[in-house]
Amino acid sequence: QVRLVESGGGLVQAGGSLRLSCAVSGRTFSPYNMAWFRQAPGKDREFLARINWGGGRFHADSVKGRFTISSDNPKNTVYLQMNSLKPEDTAVYYCAAGSWGAAPRDYDYWGQGTQVTVSS
């Protein structure tokens, strides 16, 4: 079993930055690919970025250049650095572990989510 716990969300003004963390426990995440998604009220869960155990990364076009996924393997932690935040980035952000994909169904394990609110 894999347990994911997100942290780092909060309230930030437009143009600001936040760094989200996802702590992985239960098993090392090296067999899994890790990803970040977000879900705004009334919208579908949106893929943001993914990273594999070798450090290979992919970012969705919607956040490329503003958001960066990274990992610290010894700490079993994945990060999402978010810069130049906009009010439309307001959502609950989720960490996920699973296969290499961009759909929620590609991921087997999910964290509880952390709220990010960007004020204008």
Image: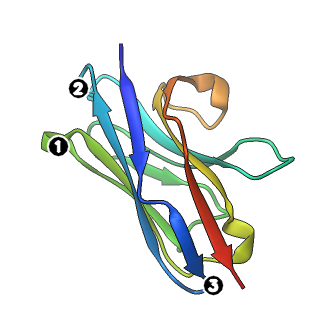
Q: Residue at x 53, y 73 (%)?
A: 66
In the picture of the structure, the residue carrying the numbered disc 1 is 75
Q: Residue at x 12, y 41 (%)?
A: 74
Q: Residue furthest left?
A: 74
Earlier residue among tags 2 and 3:
3
Quote the CA–CA distance across marks 2 and 3. 35 Å
Q: Residue furthest front?
A: 11
Do the residues under discs 1 and 3 have CB atoms within 8 angstroms?
Answer: no
Q: Is residue 114 left or right of residue 53?
A: right
Eyeballing the image, is 39 above or below 59? Answer: above
The secondary element bearing badge 2 is classed as: loop
The secondary element bearing badge 1 is classed as: helix
Q: Kindly identify which numbered label has been placed on residue 14.
A: 3
Eyeballing the image, is 19 above or below 85? Answer: above
Q: How is the image coloured?
A: rainbow
Task: Point out residue 84 in the picture as x, y percentages from the top left corner.
Answer: 56, 82
Quarter that holds the N terminus: top left
In front: label 2 or label 3: 3
Q: Is residue 96 left or right of residue 63?
A: left
**What amino acid is labelled 2 in the image?**
Thr
Q: Nearer the viewer, residue 51 or 72?
A: 72
The secondary element bearing badge 3 is classed as: loop
Quote the CA–CA distance across marks 1 and 2. 9 Å
Q: Residue at x 58, y 87 (%)?
A: 15
In the picture of the structure, the residue carrying the numbered disc 2 is 28
Task: Point out residue 41 in the picture as x, y percentages from the top left corner.
Answer: 81, 50
Q: Nearer the viewer, residue 38 or 30?
A: 38
**What amino acid is labelled 3 in the image?**
Ala
Label 1 Cα crowd, 10 Å radius (few <14 / some 14-19 / many 20+): few
Quarter that holds the C terminus: bottom right
